[in-house]
Amino acid sequence: MADDVTPPPAENDTPSPLDKAPSDKARPPDGDRQILPKRGRLLDQVIEAILFVGDHALDPDEFVTHYPEIDASDVRKAARRLGARYRREHRPYHISLTDKGFQLGLLPERRRQILEQTRPDKGIKLSREAIEVLSVVAYKQPVTREEVSRFLGVESGSALRQLVKRRLLEINPSESGKKGTERYTTSSRFLELFGLKDLDDLPVTEDLANI
């Protein structure tokens, strides 16, 4: 009796997709999350958003554990592209590289200028914490308490209340009216104290450090 041998498929036969062995690369990501490209606007926007709202430094090696389709080097390149754009656009903040990863923060020059304007002989004296909070609100307004706290990495409620009491900041209720969603902006007294005609006169600098 002859052996039962299944003949090979003809050359014009097209294998069914069901006959193909599953591949890890073909499997959809968990939770149908969006796939990040190795470079481009989408990756830059994701990195920028994390830097703005994150409460700790962005570690490229840890980040790619959630997005295995990209490498840590792609994250580093995206952070550097963002830093270069901030320099070109003379933003008051910059991206620095620490031993824990990339962090977004105000330029040292901006902090010094705020400190200079709040000397005792200027008629007002603020704590260093209040100065940091005032700087963030000035350049990112309108902004919520939570956003300020995330940007600085510390709770900012007390400093915000101090600045409102001194009439340097104003509270603007949100449309929802929910507690904690109010947005803070600088006041007319802030402009007067700093000798500014309007917010467009806020100082900028071209002396930005490389990442």
Image: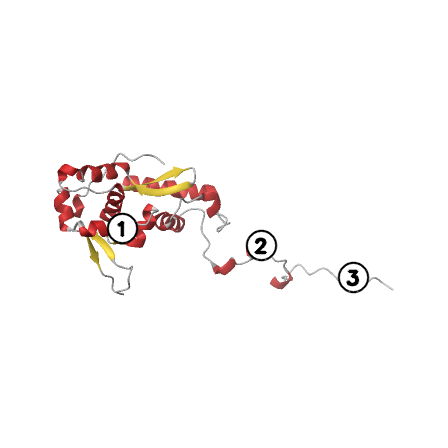
- Location of the C terminus (image quadrant): top left
**Kind of element beneath mark 1:** helix
- N-terminal of the pair, mark 1 or mark 3, is 3
Q: Can residue 197 be seen in this snapshot?
A: no
* Residue at the disc numbered 1: 158
| Label ID, residue 24 | 2
Which kind of residue does numbered mark 2 sit on? Asp
Q: Residue at x 46, y 41 (%)?
A: 73
Question: In the image, which is nearer the foreground, mark 1 or mark 3?
Answer: 1
Query: Observer-nearest residue: 117 or 103?
Result: 117
Q: Residue at x 42, y 41 (%)?
A: 101
**x and y percent of residue 184 in the render?**
23, 54
Q: Residue at x 16, y 47 (%)?
A: 190
Which kind of residue does numbered mark 1 sit on? Ser
**Up/down of 70 relative to 21, above or below:** above
Proximity of marks 2 and 1: CB atoms separated by less than 8 Å: no
Proximity of marks 1 and 3: CB atoms separated by less than 8 Å: no
**x and y percent of residue 121 in the render?**
13, 37
In the image, is 120 to the left or to the right of 8? left
- N-terminal of the pair, mark 3 or mark 2, is 3
Pointer 1 local density, CA inside 10 Å: few below 14, some 14–19, many at least 20: few
* Residue at the disc numbered 3: 5
Proximity of marks 3 and 2: CB atoms separated by less than 8 Å: no
- Location of the N terminus (image quadrant): bottom right
Pointer 3 local density, CA inside 10 Å: few below 14, some 14–19, many at least 20: few
Q: How much space separates mark 3 and mark 2, taking CA atoms?
A: 32 Å
**Up/down of 165 relative to 6, above or below:** above
